[in-house]
Image (cartoon, rainbow, N blue to C red):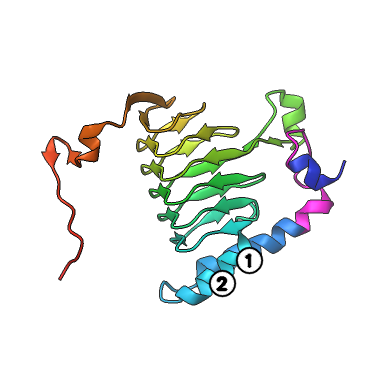
Amino acid sequence: MKAQDAMHGGVIYHPGDPAIAQKQLDALDMLFEYNSLRPSQQAEKQALMKKMFAEVGEGTYIETPFHANWAGKFVHLGKYVYCNFNVTFVDDTHIYVGDYTLFGPNCVIATACHPLNPDVRERDFQYNLPVHIGRNCWFGAGAIVLPGVTIGDNAVIGAGSVVVKDIPSDVIAVGNPCRVVRTINDDDMKLIVHGKQMEIIENLE
């Protein structure tokens, strides 16, 4: 089996295999370059993101520092995705993120797993499971999504949550392990935040 097939096939493989190690280093050099760009170098950032990521949609923006095992090579980002400071994608296999999804600072999306068997783990083997994140989700600061998880559209994941199993669409989920606490309802559509009615200000002077 080819190394790339093993990475994305859910089977145990060695990540230091020469067939993939140099490719990973090349990707990480691009990540280093991205993190070294000034905030004002927007055109350069956008051009480099298109090289780094499997897919990147219009209007998507990633604050630096940004971290990824493969610099986003196996990350598919929709349009207008936003990643705040210090987001980490452990992208040893594919991560799919829908349009308009927001990540707070210090979020981690992980795909890599290590065997529970200590003898196999000591030999540096791992396996990977993809993560699927829907459209228009919001992840609070420090949220962690574990390998193999699917999260539906419009879901809100509370700050500091650890998502260990699938989360459906249109819900608020929090905690460790992350659990659904309620469905997003009409009050949320009225922009009631902490018991207070909020208004939308379209244009600021």
Q: Which residue is mark 2?
A: 47
* Residue type at numbered disc 1: Lys
Question: Where is 181 relative to 200, above or below?
Answer: above
**Residue 132 placement, left or right of 171:** right
* Residue type at numbered disc 2: Ala
Secondary structure of the residue carrying tag 1 is helix
The answer to whether residue 20 is magenta is: yes
Q: Judge by depth and name the residue closer to the eye, 201 or 38.
A: 201
Secondary structure of the residue carrying tag 2 is helix
Question: Where is 134 relative to 172, above or below?
Answer: below
**Residue 173 placement, left or right of 121:** left
Q: Position of residue 109 (x, y in %)?
A: 52, 42
Query: Marks 1 and 2, how far apart in space?
Result: 7 Å
Residue 14 visible in the snapshot: no
The answer to the question of whether label 1 and label 2 lie on touching residues, with beta carbons closer than 8 A, is yes
What is the magenta range? 8-22
Question: Where is 48 relative to 97, above or below?
Answer: below
Q: Quadrant of the N terminus?
A: top right
Q: Position of residue 138 (x, y in %)?
A: 38, 43
Residue drawn at the location 75% of the way across and 37% of the way down: 9
The crowding category of the residue bearing disc 2, from other C-alpha atoms within 10 Å (few below 14, some 14 to 19, many at least 20), is: few
Instruction: State which quadrant residue 94 falls in.
Output: top right
Marker count (numbered): 2
**Residue 50 placement, left or right of 117:** left
Q: Position of residue 105 (x, y in %)?
A: 39, 50
Q: Which residue is mark 1?
A: 51
